[in-house]
């Protein structure tokens, strides 16, 4: 790779990032925002626009496993499980807290027929904020929005819940697995994910956000395939020559995410098969492509770095405004065309907010906490 630099996400002793993968992660985050926008106009997953935007989470899990393997697999002789967990906590948790706080601040502006926020007392909201900030799933008695979300103040926190589990499993035993055993785990999890997608109750893998049985099973299968698959990919990765990898990968992610629902309500298995092909075959190929690609010009390098830097903050701050947008659309009975100015403001405003959170909150907090937690071991930020 050319012009590989340490990004805002890294410790000073962290290996250089793959610029192209950083950029693709940012593109995937933007598709998630667009997917959520169109939820306001969908009656179900069958007619959802940007229909497969939920698959970005599987791409994130895959990237996470690849990055974990690349960054940490050769460090376990000198790094303890405790040190690894602290590093991941520092990297992930400040934005978990910020997402919960933003969700709480905007909560009373999000009332509509689907959820009556006026019935929620301030003490209930404060408890919900604390639970979300601590990444504790909300049980029915604490699910203050009433739509069954694991984290009702900031829905996307559910994937961080599974991300933490994946990181802990990696630290405790997955990193110890020889490549053959890791391959067997990936194969078994892939078969389980395929079975859930094709023969499961939904005909898709848009699950994991609720503590219901199907959601928990599906969420674990998504993580248990994609995270180890990314790790396996990092072990066997041998770069090939690819020109324009970022642009090819970006277009591929947009197309795969925007693909209309396949098969309809009478053939749920067809869409499940599409989800399986994307998560199990196409996304690993895209990660391989991105890891092989080099950014050879300054403009593409800067674009990739910016997208990579804001990707995680964007994912974690946009959804409270989706609740507001949904309530606005429903309360005013708006079409998408009528709400387009608000939709554009939400997308660009979320990107701006993500950048501000990165520069004025996330980076300074991580720098401060890193100095405190790693002072004795001399692991500078």
Image (spheres, rainbow, N blue to C red):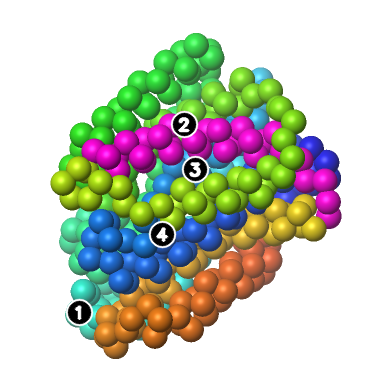
Q: Is residue 260 left or right of residue 124?
A: right
The mark that comes first in sequence, 3 or 1, is 3
- Secondary element at tag 2: helix
Who is closer to the viewer here, 65 or 132?
65
Residue 339: percent from the left, percent from the top?
40, 82
Q: Which segment did they paint magenta?
A: 269-298
Of residues 209 and 96, which is closer to you in this image?
Answer: 209
Quadrant of res 73? top right
Report the mark closest to the observer, 1 or 2: 2
Residue under label 3: 59
Residue 17 colored magenta? no
For label 2, count other residues whose C-alpha is less than 10 Å away and answer few (under 14), some (14-19) or many (20+): few
Q: Please name the residue that numbered disc 4 is placed on.
A: 50
Secondary structure beneath label 1:
loop
Give the structural element (helix, strand or loop) at label 3: helix
Q: In the rendering, at what x and y percent does residue 118 appear?
A: 23, 83
Quarter location, residue 215: top left
Count of numbered marks: 4
Residue, far bottom: 332
Question: Residue 303 in the image: x percent, y percent?
Answer: 72, 58
Which mark sits nearer the N-terminus, 1 or 4? 4
Q: Quadrant of residue 111?
A: bottom left
Q: CA distance from mark 3 to mark 1?
A: 33 Å
Mark 1, residues whose alpha carbon is within 10 Å: few (<14), some, or many (≥20)?
A: few
């Amino acid at each position: 790779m050319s012009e590989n630099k340490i990004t805002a996400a890294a410790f000073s002793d962290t290996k250089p990032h793959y610029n192209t993968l950083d950029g693709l992660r940012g593109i995937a985050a933007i598709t998630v925002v667009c997917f959520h926008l169109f939820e306001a106009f969908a009656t179900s997953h069958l007619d959802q626009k940007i229909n497969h935007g939920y698959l970005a989470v599987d791409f994130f899990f895959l990237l996470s496993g690849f990055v974990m393997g690349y960054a940490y697999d050769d460090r376990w002789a000198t790094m303890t499980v405790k040190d690894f967990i602290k590093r991941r906590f520092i990297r992930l948790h400040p934005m978990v807290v910020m997402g919960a706080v933003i969700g709480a601040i905007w909560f009373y502006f999000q009332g509509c027929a689907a959820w009556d926020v006026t019935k929620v007392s301030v003490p209930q909201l404060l408890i919900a904020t604390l639970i979300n900030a601590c990444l504790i799933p909300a049980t029915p008695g604490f699910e203050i929005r009433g739509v069954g979300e694991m984290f009702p103040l900031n829905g996307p926190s559910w994937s961080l819940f599974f991300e933490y589990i994946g990181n802990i499993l990696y630290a405790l035993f997955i990193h110890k697995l020889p490549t053959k055993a890791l391959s067997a785990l990936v194969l078994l999890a892939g078969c389980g994910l395929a079975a859930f997608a094709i023969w499961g109750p939904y005909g898709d893998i848009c699950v994991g956000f609720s503590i219901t049985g199907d959601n928990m099973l599906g969420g674990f299968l998504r993580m248990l395939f994609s995270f180890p698959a990314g790790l396996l990919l990092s072990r066997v990765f041998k770069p090939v020559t690819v020109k324009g990898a970022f642009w090819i990968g970006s277009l591929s992610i947009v197309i795969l995410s925007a693909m209309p629902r396949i098969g309809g309500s009478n053939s749920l298995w067809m869409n499940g098969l599409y989800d399986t092909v994307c998560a199990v075959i196409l996304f690993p190929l895209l990660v391989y492509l991105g890891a092989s690609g080099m950014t050879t010009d300054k403009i593409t390098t800067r674009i990739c770095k910016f997208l990579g830097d804001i990707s995680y903050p964007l994912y974690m701050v946009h959804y409270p405004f989706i609740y507001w947008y949904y309530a606005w659309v429903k309360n005013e009975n708006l079409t998408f065309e009528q709400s387009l100015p608000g939709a554009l403001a939400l997308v660009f405003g979320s990107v701006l907010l993500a950048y501000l959170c990165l520069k004025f909150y996330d980076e300074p907090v991580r720098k401060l906490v890193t100095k405190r937690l790693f002072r004795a071991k001399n692991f500078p930020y």
